[in-house]
Image (tube, rainbow, N blue to C red):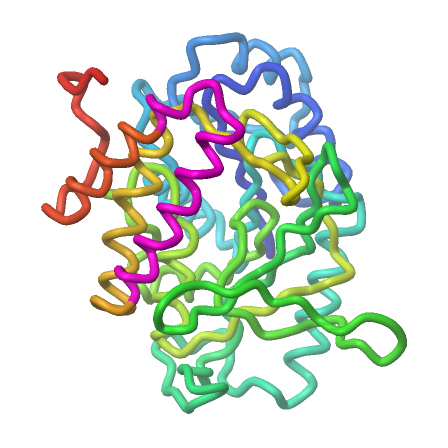
Amino acid sequence: MEVLIVVVSYNGETTIANTLNAALALDADAPILLIDNASQDRTRDVTRAMGSPRIRVLENEENLGVGAAFNIGIREAKAMEAKWLMLLDQDSEPKADALRVMQDALKAIQGSGLVQGTEAEETPTADRCRGRTAGRGGIGALFPTVRCKQYPEVVHYPMDWTGAGFEAVVPAQGLGAPTWITVDTAISSGALYRVAALEAVGGFNEGYFIDFVDHECHLRLREAGYRLWWVREAELRHDLGRIQQMTDSGLWIEHPPYRYYYMARNMVRGYWRFGGMRALWHLVGDMREHAGRLLANSRNATEAISWMRLGVLHGVLGKTGKLSSRFRL
């Protein structure tokens, strides 16, 4: 077995069937594991009603968070002797050829001489590339092109870490443009991870619970010397947040107010870990700008900003894990 497809769900009854059908269309042999984080809606009923023998459901008794669910996926992949793990959010729809395109890119990259090391290696050495660790430990992950489901002309670009923040990787277009590009991070949904690489860096950070879980793991993979690649011809449709709205300043993405707690807290922890005070100062500017956009676009701006402030405080204090129910804003 080469690939295990893992879908993580939580109250996703309205989208989970589309996601699983898209996953079933990816490859005739790849098994699918749905890890449900104690959904309170009909997510599990919808999944069972599909009746596919390729889908296995693992039901958690409580919401363990995204990081813990991802790590369950790593353990399941290892137990099944799958070398690669594909992660999908519950509202993502990869194109039918996305997995094949990434597998073809994997073979091409491995045969190109651009990476050194074999899949058997788990501890890479490192060199330097564009001022950052490039890696001789082989490929850590491949990412598809992620388009907004509602506005497919909008691409959620992969990013590079500058040492103070993230910048989008926007490639050249037209003939001769590269079809796969090294990047530092991207959205985890649709990503194809090398299981041994994830194991080598300790998996995903369960203390983050949700939000920034993927980017923190990707930066650790890069730090450890693994290369991450964006495969541009593989595509996935995905709506971030609960609201997507086109505005004069571009696509506005809005999350439930409580999510701003986790985003702020985990970004404070992550920016400090990888960039220190310089990165934190940069993050403060980004948060001020986003608070302004919340005030301009959201009916829940005050609540969201309150959650954001609490997240910043807890990030500075080093708190992690699921937010205690005693906090009521």
| Residue located at (43% from left, 42% from top) | 290
Residue 170 higher or lower than 9, as above or below: below
| Residue located at (64% from left, 22% from top) | 15
| Residue located at (16% from left, 24% from top) | 324
Q: Quadrant of the C terminus?
A: top left
Is 145 left, or right, of 205 in this rendering?
right
- The quadrant in which residue 198 appears is bottom left
Q: Nearer the viewer, residue 135 or 86?
A: 135
Is 202 left, or right, of 296 in this rendering?
left
Q: Nearer the viewer, residue 113 or 229?
A: 229
Q: Position of residue 73 (x, y in %)?
A: 43, 43
Q: Position of residue 35 (x, y in %)?
A: 46, 30
Residue 187 higher or lower than 323, as above or below: below
Span shown in magenta: 279-304
Q: Which residue in the rendered view is the most extreme toward the right?
A: 175
Residue 220 higher or lower than 51, as above or below: below
The magenta stretch spans residue 287: yes
Q: Position of residue 20 (x, y in %)?
A: 66, 29
| Residue located at (21% from left, 28% from top) | 323
What secondary structure characterizes most of the magenta part?
helix
Q: Position of residue 315 (x, y in %)?
A: 19, 46
The magenta stretch spans residue 300: yes
